[in-house]
Image (cartoon, rainbow, N blue to C red):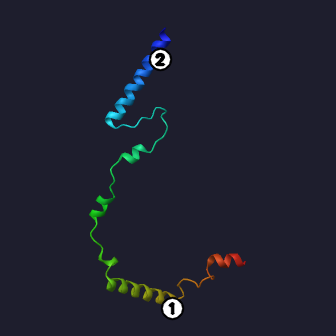
Amino acid sequence: MSGLKGLLAAAALKGVTEARARIFGHVLNPLGKRSPHKILRKKLIGWKVAQWYPYDIKNEDPLVLQREESERLAKLEMLKRRGKGPPKKGQGRRASKRNK
């Protein structure tokens, strides 16, 4: 008789637990396995972080982009004159290792 009482009590407890989860919006995890729900439950903070930083005019102003490009090319030319520039395609370190 006590086995039947235990089964009934367990079934009632399970029903109460499921009802509680439905009412309060909880997620049931009776097996105790890992679940991504804890991470997915958090509020998204991306837009908050994006609001912190000011608008970047460099991305849309063609004069700024052109000036940065010319500065980059000038630096690259200076490095090439000193022999410190990037190697030609197929002449780099990996290509020289393969030829040995």
Q: Quadrant of residue 59?
A: bottom left
Task: Point out which mark residue 81 bears.
Answer: 1
Q: How far apart are labels 2 and 1 at the CA level?
A: 86 Å
Expressed as whole percent of the image width and height from the top left, the position of residue 49 reads 31, 60
Looking at the image, residue 50 lies above or below residue 91:
above
Q: How far across and how far down the image is residue 56, in percent?
A: 30, 73
Disc on res. 50: none
Helix, strand, or loop for circle 2? helix
Sort mark 1 into few (<14), some (14-19) or many (20+) by Cα contacts within 10 Å.
Answer: few
Q: Earlier in the sequence, mark 2 or mark 1?
A: 2
Helix, strand or loop at label 1? It is helix
Residue 15: % across, % down: 40, 26
* Residue drawn at the location 31% of the way across and 82% of the way down: 61
In the image, farthest residue toward the top: 1
Amino acid carrying label 1: it is Arg
Residue density around tag 2, few if under 14, some if 14–19, many if 20 or more, within 10 Å: few
Residue bearing the label numbered 2: 7
Q: Is residue 33 above or below residue 4?
A: below
Frontmost residue, 31 versus 77: 31
- Is 16 in front, or is 42? 16
